[in-house]
Image (cartoon, rainbow, N blue to C red):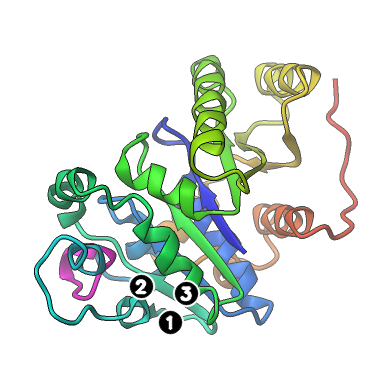
Amino acid sequence: MRRVVFNQKGGVGKSSITCNLAAISAARGKRTLVVDLDPQGNSTHYLLGRPATELKDTVADYLEQMVAFTVFNRRADEFVHASPFDNLFVMPSSPELDFLEHKLEAKHKIYKLREALKKLGESFDEIYIDTAPALNFYSRSALIAAQRCLIPFDCDDFSRQALYSILQEIQELQEDHNEDLVVEGIVANQFQPRASLPKKLVRELMDEGLPVLPVRLSSSVKMKESHQSRQPLIHMAPKHPLTRQYEDLYRVLHGEAVDLEPLAD
């Protein structure tokens, strides 16, 4: 399964959701890959413990082959790095993605990522794609390459307005490039259950018929500690409530039964 986590708005938790779902997948024994298409490289640093600026054989190096004059292109799996966690691998980001974007777009290489991930799918059970907070060449490539899309939503009105635009953009891309792409759901992130506004916004989205997932991820300093320690929650704090919420989200995405409390008034 190839799953992209996408939102044009920054600060909504794309990297946290990508990495923690992938870490749960790997902890369950599934061979799991994270592809980091965000030039900031947060997922790369989180899972590999080193900033993208220090790494070689990145996703940018792989994609650069598509516009360079090379006799023999290296395989996509040669750009995959093992993380410190069993079964969890990363195709790391690079700041060079910013400089490479125009060249790739000019040469119409928008489908190359899909070709690569389909091939990598023969070696990995699950692939998670992290994207930059922009509808750019890389996020479009990811949406074309993916089978499922998760949209993080951080429960404020600005995010709500952006959400409608995102869903429209995805629908157009489905029609033109990837009819197999399914919007798996909207993930309410940094949710504060005691505050009235987040509950009101989530309920209104549900009333509109939007695919809001039943698991809400709480706001917690534990996530910041997880980032600092470079350990996904399943490894750093396996019994923490936020970790359990991520595990419930993973189960929902995979059709497993989950005992969830209804959204309170």
Looking at the image, how many numbered discs can be counted on the residues? 3
User: Which segment is the magenta one?
Assistant: 52-59
Task: Bin the neighbour count of mark 2 within 10 Å (Cα to Cα): few under 14, some 14-19, many 20 and up.
Answer: many
Quarter of the picture holding the N terminus: bottom right
- Report the amino acid beneath label 3: Lys
Please name the residue shown 47% across and 75% down the image. Answer: 120
Above or below 81: residue 159: above
Please name the residue shown 16% across and 52% down the image. Answer: 100
Which quadrant of the view contains residue 65? bottom left
- Report the amino acid beneath label 1: Pro
Q: Secondary structure at mark 3?
A: helix
Q: Which mark is residue 151?
A: none
Task: Bin the neighbour count of mark 1 within 10 Å (Cα to Cα): few under 14, some 14-19, many 20 and up.
Answer: few
Quarter of the picture holding the C terminus: top right
Residue corresponding to mark 2:
48
Residue corresponding to mark 1:
84
Q: Are marks 2 and 1 in contact (CB under 8 Å)?
A: yes
Q: Which mark is residue 119?
A: 3
Above or below 228: residue 71: below
